[in-house]
Amino acid sequence: MIRGRRSEGGMVTAEIAVALPALVLVLTLALGAVSVVTDHLRCVDAARVGARLLARGEDAGRVRAEVALQAPEGAVIGFDVGADAITVNVTAESPPLLRALGVSARPRGIAHAVPEAAP
């Protein structure tokens, strides 16, 4: 019986050595997914703020500054103001955790609004 135990010595260490990198990868992907969802929500909120400000007739420079405060760092901000519709588009880059693993995700928020009539 004692000999049987010695032949299995180190099995737990070997199993942990194999499982630990897989666990780290799964946790990294989970954190990356949470980061993408958070950035997506920030993009949507920023686009909504921009559409609301443009609908009220605010200056484009002020709108861009307000949207940049709400959006994730490095987000690309674009807006189109037409006679009957306003569209604000905010797109962010993939989080660094996912880019390091070669995964591409682009959080994006789009908001539409109708210009308010002048008083």
Image (spheres, rainbow, N blue to C red):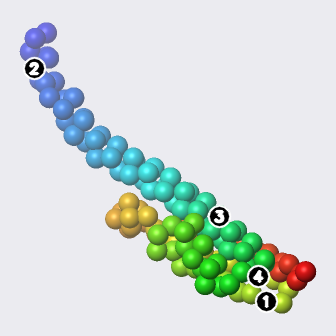
The quarter of the picture where residue 87 lies is bottom right
64 lies left or right of 104: right
Q: Which residue is mark 1?
A: 82
Q: Which residue is mark 3?
A: 45
* Residue at x-position 47% and y-position 69%: 73
- Front of the two marks 4 and 2: 4
Q: Which residue is mark 4?
A: 57
* Residue 18 drawn at (x, y percent): 25, 42
Callout 4–callout 1 Cβ contact below 8 Å: no
* Residue 72 drawn at (x, y percent): 51, 67
Local crowd at mark 1 within 10 Å, few (<14), some, or many (≥20)?
few
Q: Amino acid at mark 3?
A: Asp
Circle 1 SS class: loop
The quarter of the picture where residue 68 lies is bottom right
Query: Relative to the observer, which residue lies in front, 25 or 79?
Result: 79
- The span from disc 4 to disc 3 (Cα, nearest Å) is 19 Å
- The span from disc 1 to disc 3 (Cα, nearest Å) is 21 Å
- Determine which of the numbered discs, if any, sits on residue 6 in the image: 2
* Residue at x-position 85% and y-position 85%: 84
Circle 2 SS class: helix
- The span from disc 4 to disc 1 (Cα, nearest Å) is 12 Å
- The span from disc 2 to disc 1 (Cα, nearest Å) is 78 Å
- The span from disc 4 to disc 2 (Cα, nearest Å) is 79 Å
Callout 1–callout 3 Cβ contact below 8 Å: no
Query: Relative to the observer, which residue lies in front, 74 or 35?
Result: 74
Circle 4 SS class: loop
Q: What quarter of the picture does the C terminus occupy?
A: bottom right
102 lies left or right of 60: left
Q: Amino acid at mark 2?
A: Arg
Q: What quarter of the picture does the N terminus occupy?
A: top left
Q: Is residue 97 visible?
A: yes
